[in-house]
Every structure is written in structure tokens, then in C-alpha cells.
Amino acid sequence: MTRRLLAAAALAALATGAQASSPDAWAQFRADVKARCLAGASDMKSPTIIVHPVGTETHGIAVLMAGQDKRICIYDKRAKTVELTPAT
């Protein structure tokens, strides 16, 4: 399921024409998505996180997993805020 979700996010990024940027800028973007998603999921115990490399034109996307608890994190690139799906 996770791979399908990331594949869909990758296609969305390509379809929306994600802006090219420097490797350092993309690394900083991924670090910001990771930090904010982890902060938003502070009730999860030591989650593994997979951050989509570029997201979409307007959003970053990450998948968080801790045991049976799996969540999708959506990061607003402009507002720099996150929303997470409810716990499973």
C-alpha cells in the first residue's frame, strides 16, 4: 500500500510540474517535511517515516509507520503546516 501511495504521489508531482530546485533545497524541503510530520505525530512511538522526494506543486507527502499504526502526512508548502490522517 505504501509503495502505491508514493507512486501515486510521484505521478501527481510530475503531472503538476513540480518546480526544479537545487539538491540542497530539496534536501532542506525533505528535512522540513520530516520534522513537521514527526512533530504532528508525537503520539506515535518511534515511527518510521518515508518522505516523498518532491511532493506535489503545493504539498509535501510522507508516510509514517509504527507497528500497525500507519498515517499519511500532508505538508502545505506555503503555510508550512501539516495534517495527518487519523490513526489506524
Image: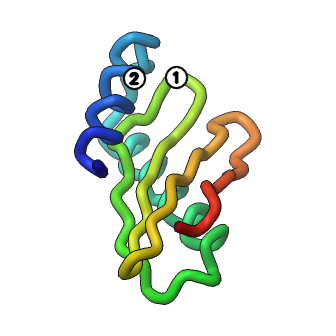
Q: Nearer the viewer, residue 60 or 32?
A: 60
Residue at figure coordinates x 57%, y 34% from the top left: 59
Q: Nearer the viewer, residue 82 or 68?
A: 68
On the rendered structure, is 79 left or right of 40?
A: right
Q: Position of residue 32 (x, y in %)?
A: 54, 57
Q: Which numbered circle lies on residue 13?
A: 2
Bin the neighbour count of mark 1 within 10 Å (Cα to Cα): few under 14, some 14-19, many 20 and up. Answer: some
Q: Is residue 69 above or below residue 29?
A: below
Seen as rendered, the residue at the extreme right is: 79
Bin the neighbour count of mark 2 within 10 Å (Cα to Cα): few under 14, some 14-19, many 20 and up. Answer: many
On the rendered structure, is 78 left or right of 49?
A: right
Q: Position of residue 1 (x, y in %)?
A: 29, 49
Return the disc, 1 or 2, that comes first in the chain's sequence: 2
Q: Secondary structure at mark 2?
A: helix
Residue at figure coordinates x 52%, y 22% from the top left: 57
Residue that carries the numbered disc 1 in the rendered image: 57
Q: Position of residue 76 (x, y in %)?
A: 66, 40
Q: Position of residue 47 (x, y in %)?
A: 42, 78
Asked if labels 2 and 1 touch by Cβ distance under 8 angstroms, the answer is yes
Q: Is residue 11 above or below residue 6?
A: above
Identify the amino acid type marked 2. Answer: Ala
Q: Nearer the viewer, residue 43 or 87?
A: 87
Residue at figure coordinates x 27%, y 39% from the top left: 4
Q: Secondary structure at mark 1?
A: loop
